[in-house]
Every structure is written in structure tokens, then in C-alpha cells.
């Protein structure tokens, strides 16, 4: 999806002009994938723009870095404040926020320990990642021939830039085969997650999502949906799913910050349920959209108001 230019980007403590936010060709992360990132959304609310679960995203960013022994030179509080300042100067009413911690210029070679750690936070207006039509009517999915990395190869718990070549391979395969998005299996053959989203199925009124041990990211949207579903009185389980469990589910949906909540129409050409957004999917989707816009009092602590 094209990037829509905004005004300033926060880089190592400075707000720099959009087109001056440059890095050197010999930036370590460009060559070796030694960076970690987050995806966060800000939504319009009755009290101005609010960022959804901002501090938790920054905590996860710091944990992603920790897994790679990268020391982030800013606390979560400092990253939250940097994000606030960056959103204020950009005058964004809503948008997508992309913090990135990456090993910078000065060292080459595979020992990353002496490298300089750079931190940047950008934001721009971004619509529905999988399209408004997908959010409304659902998407067609395909199990990828590319599997999710083994946790002892590239830990999926870290949102590491380099690891996303795996997601990109799966995405391209799905698109070139005429589907909207891919589902990846773990090395053990269980359903893991999608290229940038977690997945849920509904069976007999119970929600099931793959555990982190199947390579699923501990998604904040996943957590929000699990909380909302439990509060609505549904049973929610983390459990291993086989691909055939997707084919025979009553409902399925995927969720993530960029994608939000998207119903699944079919998997590998097997129609899921009625082939249109199911009642529980629609219920959770509409509560999620109201929550991020600050319309649900119960979840107001999940919002960080910019002003
Ligand atoms: N799994 C993966 C692999 C993933 O990248 C994301 C977020 C999720 C699950 C959902 O996590 P959460 O956003 O906390 O609910 N993917 C981010 C980047 C997407 C991209 O394509 O770039 C996002 O949604 O912002």
C-alpha cells in the first residue's frame, strides 16, 4: 500500500522533515535484517485522536529488541512521549504509527553487538490494510506452502524486520494464486497465523485461536478480541488447530493492528460457514471498531489521548 507523506518523523530524539529521514546505505539492518518494529494505530475519537494500546506496543517493541540482545536507549514512557510529540506536529487525526529500532551505520559483519542502535517513529494516514470490501464481506485465504519460522530459527515472538521476508513470501504466493491473504502453519503442521495477523475460528459458539507455541504473535488485537469476547460471555480457548479445523469452522476471522478485524470467506476454496461474516465475527468486529474510537467505556484504559 502506498505511503502517504506526512510532515515529520521522530529520529533518535529529533523531529526531522519527512524527506530528511534518511539512513546510510551501509546501515547494518538493511543488510542483515537486524531491526525490530511495531505497528500501531491512532483513531479519531470524540476527544481528539487516541492511540490504541500505545504503551503495550512499546513494551512489545522493547521485548522484540531484547530477544535480539538489542538495547533500546529509550524507556517505554519516553517512546510514548516521542509518539505523542510526533503526532502533534503532524496534526494527524488518525493514522498508522511505525516505530522501528534498528542497528545503524558504523559496523559491518555478523557480530551485531558493537553496532549503534537507532530508533525512529513515523506515522502516516493508512486505510484498511486488506481493503474496506474485505472488512465488510470477508476475504479468501490460502494455506501457504511457506511455513512460519521455527522458534529456534527466527523467534516469531519478536517483530524482527528480517523475519518478515517469510511473511512477504507467503503473501506473494497467496496473491499470485488469486487469494487475498495467506495462513501459515508451524513447523509441526499446526495453524500458526497469517502474514501480519492472528487468526480465530468459532465452533459451537466457542472461540479458538492458536497458542504462541504454534508461532502466533502475542497480538494486541488478539488480546483485545479475547477480552471483548469473554466479556460478551463467550468461551475463548487457545488451542492447536489443524488446517481442516479451518475448513469446517462455523466462522473464522483474522485480526491485527493494520488489518483490524477481517472475516474469512473461505480457506483453500472451502467455504467457511455461510461464506459471509458470521454473527459472532460481526458482533466482535463492531465492538472492536467502537472500542478503538473510544465509544466503549469499559475499555477506555486502552486509549492514549494525544491532546
Ligand atoms: N502476527 C503478525 C505476524 C503480525 O505482524 C501482526 C501485526 C500480528 C500478528 C497482529 O498483532 P497486533 O497488531 O499486535 O494485533 N502486524 C503489524 C504489521 C503489519 C504489516 O504488514 O506491516 C500490524 O498489524 O501493524
Image (tube, rainbow, N blue to C red):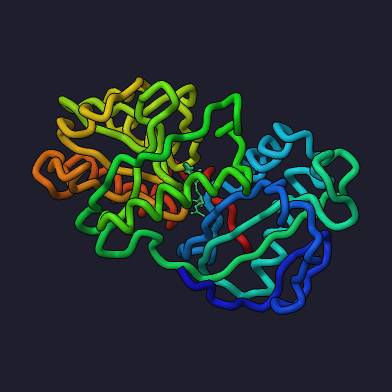
> Residue 136: x and y, percent?
23, 58
Q: Name the residue at 64% across, 67% down.
A: 87
> Residue 177: x and y, percent?
27, 55
Quarter holding the C terminus? Answer: bottom right
Say if 166 sits above or below 87 in the image: above
**60 with respect to 219 (left or right):** right
Say if 246 sits above or below 38 in the image: above
Q: Name the residue at 67% across, 78% down.
A: 7
**62 with respect to 267 (left or right):** right
Residue 79 visible to the viewer: no
Say if 295 sits above or below 211 in the image: below
> Residue 223: x and y, percent?
45, 35
Q: Residue furthest toward the left?
A: 274
Quarter of the image for residue 62 reads top right
**265 with respect to 130 (left or right):** left
**232 with respect to 300 (left or right):** left
Relative to the observer, which residue lies in front, 278 or 186? 186
Q: Name the residue at 82% across, 59% down.
A: 12
Relative to the observer, which residue lies in front, 127 or 164? 164
Quarter of the image for residue 98 reads bottom right
Quarter of the image for residue 298 reads top left
Say if 215 sits above or below 23 in the image: above
> Residue 169: x and y, percent?
45, 50
Q: Name the residue at 66% across, 45% down.
A: 58
Residue 2 visible to the viewer: yes
Amino acid at each position: 500500500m502506498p505511503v502517504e507523506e506526512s510532515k515529520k518523523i521522530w529520529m533518535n530524539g529529533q523531529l526531522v522533515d519527512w524527506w530528511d529521514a534518511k539512513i546510510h546505505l551501509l546501515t547494518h539492518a538493511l543488510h542483515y535484517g537486524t531491526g525490530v518494529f511495531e505497528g500501531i494505530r491512532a483513531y479519531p475519537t470524540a476527544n481528539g485522536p487516541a492511540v490504541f494500546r500505545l504503551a503495550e506496543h512499546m513494551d512489545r517493541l522493547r521485548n522484540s529488541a531484547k530477544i535480539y540482545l538489542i538495547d533500546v536507549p529509550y524507556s517505554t514512557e519516553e517512546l510514548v512521549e516521542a509518539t505523542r510529540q510526533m503526532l502533534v506536529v503532524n496534526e494527524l487525526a488518525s493514522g498508522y504509527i511505525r516505530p522501528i529500532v534498528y542497528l545503524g551505520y558504523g559496523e559491518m559483519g555478523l557480530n551485531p553487538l558493537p553496532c549503534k542502535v537507532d530508533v525512529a517513529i513515523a506515522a502516516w494516514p493508512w486505510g484498511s490494510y486488506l481493503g474496506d470490501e474485505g472488512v465488510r464481506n470477508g476475504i479468501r485465504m490460502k494455506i501457504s506452502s511457506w511455513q512460519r519460522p521455527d522458534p529456534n530459527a527466527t523467534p516469531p515472538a519478536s517483530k524482527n524486520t528480517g523475519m518478515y521476508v517469510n511473511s512477504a513470501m507467503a503473501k506473494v504466493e497467496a496473491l499470485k494464486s488469486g487469494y487475498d491473504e495467506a495462513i501459515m502453519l508451524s513447523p509441526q503442521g499446526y495453524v500458526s497465523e497469517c502474514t501480519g495477523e492472528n487468526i480465530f475460528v468459532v465452533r459451537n459458539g466457542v472461540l479458538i485461536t492458536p497458542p504462541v507455541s504454534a508461532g502466533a504473535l502475542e497480538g494486541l488485537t488478539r488480546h483485545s478480541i479475547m477480552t471483548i469476547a469473554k466479556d460478551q460471555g463467550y468461551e475463548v480457548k487457545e488451542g492447536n488447530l489443524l488446517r481442516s479445523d479451518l475448513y469446517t469452522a462455523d466462522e473464522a476471522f483474522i485480526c491485527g493492528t493494520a488489518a483490524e478485524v477481517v472475516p474469512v470467506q473461505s480457506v483453500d476454496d472451502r467455504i467457511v460457514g455461510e461464506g459471509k461474516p458470521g454473527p459472532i465475527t460481526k458482533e466482535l468486529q463492531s465492538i472492536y471498531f467502537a472500542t478503538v474510537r473510544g465509544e466503549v467505556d469499559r475499555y477506555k484504559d486502552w486509549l492514549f489521548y494525544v491532546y
